[in-house]
Image (cartoon, rainbow, N blue to C red):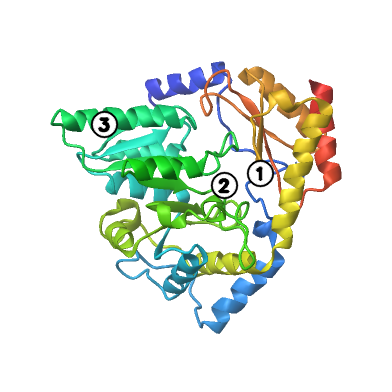
Amino acid sequence: MKFSKNLSAKLDTRKQNLTFRNLPSSADLIDFSSNDYLGFSKSESIFQNVHQYLIAADCIQNGATGSRLLSGNHKVYPEAESYIAQFHQCESALIFNSGYDANVGFFSSVPQKGDLVLYDELCHASIRDGIQLSNAKAYKFNHNDFEDLEKLILRCRDLQNKGVVVNEIYVVTESVFSMDGDTPNLLELVRLSGEYDANLVIDEAHALGVFGDSETLAGQGLVQELGLQDKVFARIMTFGKGLGCHGAAILGSQDLKDYLVNFARSFIYTTGLSPHAVATILVAYQHLNKDKKNIQALRENIIHFNQQKNLLGLKPLFVRSKSSIQSAIIPGNESVKSIAKQIQKQGFDVKAILSPTVPEGQERLRFCLHSFNSKEEISAVMACLYSLL
């Protein structure tokens, strides 16, 4: 069948620029690339407990059968959402089919005409895609630069003084950035948002299961670790990382949940998740609540990785991070791809992140750390990087 010349030309350009994407084949390498930070995706205990839960609930059903507003709101949903809301100390939780769906649904429907969205320039593509679909005006601020953010807010206030209607201001960031692994100063961000009466929205996709510590709970995310849950308008929790399953939830007030059920198109016009998928989310949360060993092992591995950076003199290459994501900047698609391939030949699954996924000149090796990585594996992969550089 005939294929568009324009589309073919775009593919050819990608190939010439060494930015052409392929679906990778599975390889039996030591995992330093997946988002399965706690190893939950391979947990036999979670797998068996999900099966037992569904049998006990007499929920022998393979699919949701329709949108949640029609026939798909099976009985596992309310139990899971209630547990999630309690776990995250918020009024309500609404499950979406993915983190992408959650962000697109929220940002396309909540900010209105006359509102302003101020977002960190490194926010995930799903956030930016949702903002593009909204009727609100949006401006980005320099990464983790709250002086730049405050200048934008003051500029908005100047517009109000000149008679321009500015209804609501939404300030948007991530608690752990997916490509850099760094974290903003959330205490300062909460202060700033409160001072200017802005609604703070935080994507916690890469913080769930990694940050959060108390006597009773662990892994709740960075917002709860800092005790800021009552200061945030909405949190987006994604389950495909630390929980090792699929889906996402938006946390906030009951009014916000009601609004999203009525106006978020990515929620309304899609088939719901299967009972098995939602049960996996619920059981993974219960597992996170009980098993703190994996979280502690992950934190120790993050510390060990940072120690190896210092020991080998590699610290200047890396973006500063205390999370599971550690990125070594190696400019140039060709250069970083070559080094990644050599590391993979040594048995370590480390991925190169190329432009345009990251800005040109900011190409990188992205190391993802897990609770199941051994100290010896971490030392070995760092020694491998050192030898190649």
Q: Which disc, if any, is residue 340?
A: none
**Is residue 2 among the parts visible in the rendering?**
no
Q: Are marks 1 and 2 in contact (CB under 8 Å)?
A: yes
Label 3 vs label 2, nearer the camera: 3
Q: Amino acid at mark 2?
A: His
Vertical arrangement, residue 388 with respect to residue 137, above or below: above
Q: Is residue 31 left or right of residue 133?
A: right
Label 3 vs label 1, nearer the camera: 3
Q: Which badge, 3 or 2, is on the more N-terminal residue?
A: 3
Vertical arrangement, residue 375 with respect to residue 244, above or below: above
**Camera-side residue: 145 or 295?**
145
Q: Amino acid at mark 1?
A: Ser
Q: Secondary structure at mark 2?
A: loop
Residue lying at 38% horizontally and 21% vertically, measured from the top left: 6
Coordinates of residue 361 in the picture (x, y in percent) = 58, 18
Residue of label 3 = 156
Residue lying at 79% horizontally and 20% vertically, measured from the top left: 389
Coordinates of residue 198 in the picture (x, y in percent) = 33, 43
- Quarter of the image where one finds residue 39: bottom right
Q: Which badge, 1 or 2, is on the more N-terminal residue?
A: 2
Q: Amino acid at mark 3?
A: Cys
Q: Which disc, if any, is residue 206?
A: 2
Q: Which disc, if any, is residue 324?
A: 1
Q: Which badge, 3 or 1, is on the more N-terminal residue?
A: 3
Coordinates of residue 130 in the picture (x, y in percent) = 35, 41
Cα gap from disc 3 to disc 1, whole angstroms: 36 Å
- Quarter of the image where one finds residue 129: top left
